[in-house]
Amino acid sequence: MLTSFCIGGERLDSLDLKILLVTQGIKVSYDVYEQFGGTHRIHPDPLTCNCLMLPDGTVVHITDVALHMRYLKSAISLESLRNIRHALHIRTLFRLEVSDTGVPVLLHNGEKVTEVSFPPASRFYEQKTSSGLPYLGNAVLQGLDFLSFQCLWSCDYAKAGYPCQFCYSGGVFERLARKHKPDPAVPTPQDVAEITDYALNKEKTAKHIQLTGGSTMNPHGECHIIREILGEINNVVGLKNIPGEVLVYTTPPSNPEAVDQVFEAGASRIACSLEVWSEELAKTVTPGKWKFSGRQRCLDCLKYIARKYGPNKACSSFVVGIEPAESYLEGAEYLASHGIVPIASIWIPFGRPVMGRVEAPRLDYYRKVKDGLAEIYAKYDIEPPGSIGLNVCLCRDIWNHRSEIMGSIEAMLS
């Protein structure tokens, strides 16, 4: 059951609180890093994808506002100072401190909200592959059970000057291309296999894998890349030994049958992400996807997967908070009615403004999404990836609590 909290005189459940923490950020006391850094997975580095757990186990991403600001100032170029100027407006009333009894506690405007916990300690981010590639910056541990590779190939759309507005990595690729500098190093299939082996077998800090890259101009190129990566994971780890799912994100190929090789290589699900459902907003927010691959190619690929491999095998991520809730839910229902999983990733409005905005919608917007998705998942028997829930995604949390959410809706209507 979702835990209930009182903040500013308003009653919130754990998913409401997660939304506020993800969209508003937290100021983390240095004492938290100092006291728990040796015994738990909490590091003073934004690249480590820190998270906390609420009392009911809900996983919440930690954006430490102070650390985030310092990282932006050191990581991005002078031409992007406008992004820092936007970030300077970040204000949050949430703090994470060590209580008098020595436990981590979440505060809002100085008032205690709840005690929280962190994942067990890990040496994951101290490691390098045999080729010398550091794990830090190339893979992350998300929550309690996901190993995610976020940039396994470069984004040609961004290099051509058409990055998605919300994507930090896309902005990096665009700036490097404009200055005629080489792309950042990306993990080789051997690197990916070694990192996977460490997380799943040596530390047992994950059971699901997520493979993600940019977008290539050659629509068949990614399927070949993914097949090679999965083949090397199979050689080193053995795909049959992975206890959870292998979720693959890829640009939709012009011939949907190209994804067959990805499933044959061991993928559990394939995601081709629309990001926003509104076609007008898509032209502005995801210009590269709109110009080079297009909405219809994405839908054709997703429907092909659902028809051939069955419901819940095709997924599409959406950045929730950018478009009206009604628009997102319209798209979510359309996909779900075809057996496709709509994924809800919460927009983090720090550092890269979208359509000039750096402020997320109010909580009632997300509650509408939460209620609507619970009904859609139940109506079409749709199950999002994973098991516990990811740092910034709402979908698995909603699915895990769908009966409770729908029961609350019925109670309010009766």
Image (cartoon, grey):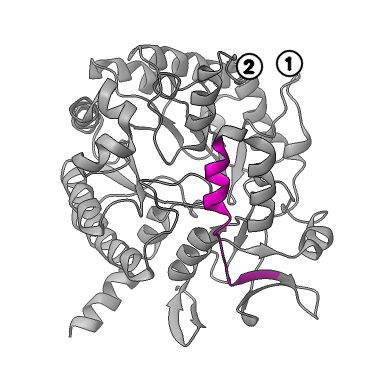
Amino acid type at mark 2: Gln
- Residue at label 2? 190
Q: Specify the farthest residue to the bottom.
A: 9
Magenta segment, which residues? 80-96
Inspect the magenta stretch and tell me whether residue 86 lies in it: yes
As rendered, which of 84 and 326 lies closer to the eye? Answer: 84
**Residue that appears at 67% across and 60% down:** 118
**Residue that appears at 41% across and 54% down:** 396
Residue 115 visible to an observer of this rendering: yes
Secondary element at tag 1: loop
Question: Cα distance, mark 1 to mark 2?
Answer: 9 Å
Q: Position of residue 206 (x, y in %)?
A: 60, 42
Q: In the rendered structure, are the residues bearing label 1 and label 2 in contact, judged by CB atoms less than 8 Å apart?
A: yes
Amino acid type at mark 1: Ser
Mark 2 Cα-neighbour bin, 10 Å: few <14, some 14–19, many ≥20: some
- Residue at label 1? 131
As rendered, which of 95 and 130 lies closer to the eye? Answer: 95
Task: Give residue 238's quadrant in the image.
Answer: top right
Describe residue 213's horizontal placement relative to residue 257 as left or right. right
Q: Position of residue 197 (x, y in %)?
A: 66, 29
As rendered, which of 319 and 228 lies closer to the eye? Answer: 319
Task: Give residue 106's quadrant in the image.
Answer: bottom right
Q: Position of residue 270 (x, y in %)?
A: 36, 31
Q: Position of residue 289 (x, y in %)?
A: 31, 28
